[in-house]
Image (cartoon, coloured by chain):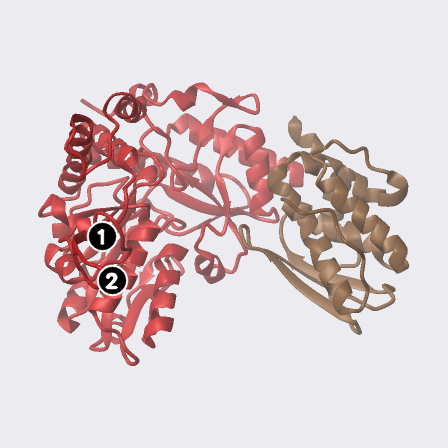
Chain colours: A red, B brown
Amino acid sequence: MSFDVARVRKDFPIFEREVNGHPLVYLDSANTSQKPVQVLDVMRAHQEKHNGNVSRSVHTLGTESTEMYEGSRAKVASFIGAGSPDEVIFTKNSTEAINLVAHSAGQFLGLKPGDEIVISEMEHHSNLVPWQLLCERTGATLRWFGITDEGRLDESRLDELVNERTKLVSVVHMSNVLGTINDVTALVARARQVGALVMLDCSQSVPHFPVDVRALGVDFIAFTGHKMLGPTGIGVLWGKFELLAAMPPFLAGGSMIETVSMAKTTFAPPPARFEAGTPPITEAIGLGAAVDYLTALDMDEVHRHEQEITRYALDQLAGVPDVRIFGPTSSENRGGTVSFGVNGVHPHDVGQILDALGVEVRVGHHCARPVCVRFAVPAMTRASFYLYTTTEEIDALARGLDQVRKVFG
Amino acid sequence: MMLDGLYQEIILDHYKHPHGRGLRDPYDGEAHHVNPTCGDEITVRVSADLSEISYDGLGCSISQASASVLHELLQGKDRHDAARIHHAFVELMQSRGQIEPDEEVLGDGVAFAGVAKFPARVKCALLPWMAFKDAAVRAGVDVGASPEVKA
């Protein structure tokens, strides 16, 4: 059966509301996605009927909570093709997952002056600042790939950038600004040649198309629940088990220990080693429900739908005078996130006028200021799509942009 | 449309035809402020007697029009009047639309009354005024305590 967007939208209660007297047109899913009733119901039912702390209670509620929490871990593992649920670590968000690797893998690698970490100019600040800090702590050098004029990762200097001094490469799988999907085949092959670890920031990819960690051949990926129909406060670090098992803890406290004495502590194996304290239990269970929802829809179908919407949006925007698209202008190897500028109008003003028409877009530097600098603009307007986005919503965006040009013309 | 309150003709006019834009020498104090959430930037220069206020920046219509209005209202004023106007403008922006602005004091600045109803945009309007205040301090001019900025 083909993808039925009208049926999908019925699962999302928020689409019943209006914004400023207009039907909600939500084009900000790269920022956070809306939640289907299936996720909301599971979270509510958990709190109402099963709430107990995980991994430490012998009572029935604690056991039920633990089963559901660990069940979510298994669902996530299978969703991304992980070898085992033990490779899935629940974090607060992608940012925490990347910071975890920057601390624990950074320590495991014994970084020192002369070593190099490689990122790219395309990164969200969450995959940039942790590495800057790691380099400051250890004396290692931070290097980065540039972006081509078309908005692709510039791999022309791959062999020089990733070299025998490189200890870790961390790049974005799909850009949260340009929409570019990075094919990391050559990068991973080069990293393997020189013995560097590879991390992928999958915050914008796992929610939108099938991601298989084994096929990617990387060592770590990070993503977050709230961009894939789940709640905020829950993210995921996936890592190869032998690496996780060799890495020291990040945060310390309850749940992550093996034996504690006053003088010395030994640590639990992964994933518990990296989940100090009571985790976001309901949120993890909500993420499990989101994974169920996406799996039932089929991620290939989700991706196909978003490709159609993206093609339609690129066509529509190309027809609006004074609009400049940043990033790939064809739907090939790009996802449903389209950033653009309206000549002579600041993105804040574009966003404000669109909001008055019920059209919700993101404006600003999208936590990726170097991308704006690369394209010589202080800010951009971004429309981002998901499995519930319709062509009518793209039409509303195009009409809104006409209004923008009228006000500022 | 609700936006009529925000994008008053006066604001759009100052945005499209800014008064006194461009950095000029000499000056006694300079401040560069950015809004980290949106990347808007402004640099303001002032002379110690406030006879010259110049600025340059990148940003939305609200922040840039606000800089133009600031130039028009404060350049050439004595420090007492400048402090009074500065206070009135900041207070207006903090008012959530509950204050009726005094056109005698705020001139074209009254057009920003509508902006106060859009909490996300109050910071835009205040950006040049906060930069001015810092630049003035560096020039040895104290324009007084502002109402607390919560935006």
- How far apart are the alpha carbons under marks 2 and 1? 9 Å
Q: Please state which of residues A344 and A64 is positioned toward the viewer in this rendering.
A: A64
Residue A135 visible here? yes
Please name the residue shown 55% across and 50% down the image: B38
Q: Please state which of residues B5 and A282 is positioned toward the viewer in this rendering.
A: A282
Q: Which residue is mark 1?
A: A274
Mark earlier in primary sequence (2, 1):
2
Identity of the amino acid at label 1?
A: Phe
Secondary structure beneath dot 1 equals helix
Please name the residue shown 87% across and 64% down the image: B51
Q: Is residue A360 above or below residue A162?
A: above
Identity of the amino acid at label 2?
A: Ser
Would you say A398 lies left or right of A155 here?
right
The N terminus of chain A: image quadrant? top left
Q: Chain of mark 2?
A: A
Q: Which residue is mark 2?
A: A104
Q: Position of residue A32 (x, y in %)?
A: 39, 38
Q: Chain of mark 1?
A: A
Q: Please state which of residues A290 and A186 is positioned toward the viewer in this rendering.
A: A290
Residue B18 visible here? no
The C terminus of chain A: image quadrant? top right
Callout 2–callout 1 Cβ contact below 8 Å: yes
Would you say A286 lies left or right of A316 here?
left
Q: Position of residue B86 (x, y in %)?
A: 80, 51
Secondary structure beneath dot 2 equals helix
The answer to which image quadrant residue A40 occupies is top left
Please name the residue shown 23% across and 28% down the image: A293
